[in-house]
Amino acid sequence: MEVPSLCDGEVEIDSEGRIFLVQPFTQANGQVVERLIFMAQVTKTGEVFTARDEKGSPVVLERVRKFPIKAGRSEVRNGKVIFPDTQRRPQLPARNVAPLLEPN
């Protein structure tokens, strides 16, 4: 799924389709902990949003074909999120087309 405004990095996705950027940081005592920062959500109906309006309703950015969401860790690269254990559509390789021959 592509959401261009997402920044690259490791993400955690929960069972409700919320995508959180994982940011490790070191506390004063030296212990490293992770901070989860909300980035976006994909609803069970396929609505994608990053914010809610003043009434609390999602501001829908995009609609995708609904799919079963499984919680887990993943990555964002160039604004694209891969959801854990989801089936992806295969990509077709670019066709090499032979140039037309000019008549002599």
Image (cartoon, helix red, strand yellow):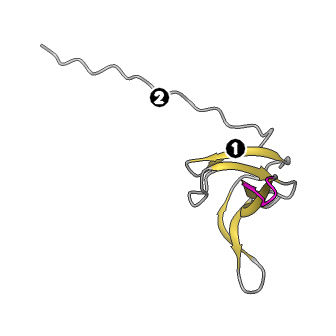
- What is the magenta range? 25-30
Q: Nearer the viewer, residue 77 or 2?
A: 77
Residue in the image at 67% along x and 37% along y: 89
**Mark 1 vs 2: CB contact within 8 A:** no
Q: Which mark is residue 40?
A: none
| Residue at numbered disc 2 | 94
Find the residue positioned furthest to the bottom.
54
Overall secondary structure of the magenta section: loop
Residue 33's place in the image compared with 49, above or below, is: above
Residue 26, image x, y percentages: 75, 55
Q: Nearer the viewer, residue 84 or 27?
A: 27
Residue 70's place in the image compared with 59, above or below, is: above
Which three-letter amino acid code belongs to the residue tagged 1? Ile
Residue in the image at 79% along x and 49% along y: 67
Residue 28 among magenta residues: yes
Residue in the image at 56% along x and 57% along y: 4
Residue 41 visible in image = yes
Residue 16, image x, y percentages: 85, 58
Q: CA distance from mark 1 to mark 2?
A: 22 Å
Which three-letter amino acid code belongs to the residue tagged 2? Ala
Q: Nearer the viewer, residue 12 or 87?
A: 12
Mark 2 nearby-residue class (10 Å; few <14, some 14–19, many ≥20) = few
* Label whose residue precedes the other's in the sequence (1 or 2): 1
Asked where in the image residue 25 lies, by quadrant, the reply is: bottom right
Find the residue positioned furthest to the right.
15
In the image, taking residue 103 as reference, residue 17 lies left or right, namely right
| Residue at numbered disc 1 | 82
Q: Nearer the viewer, residue 21 or 63?
A: 21
| 1 or 2: mark nearer the eye | 1
Residue 36 among magenta residues: no
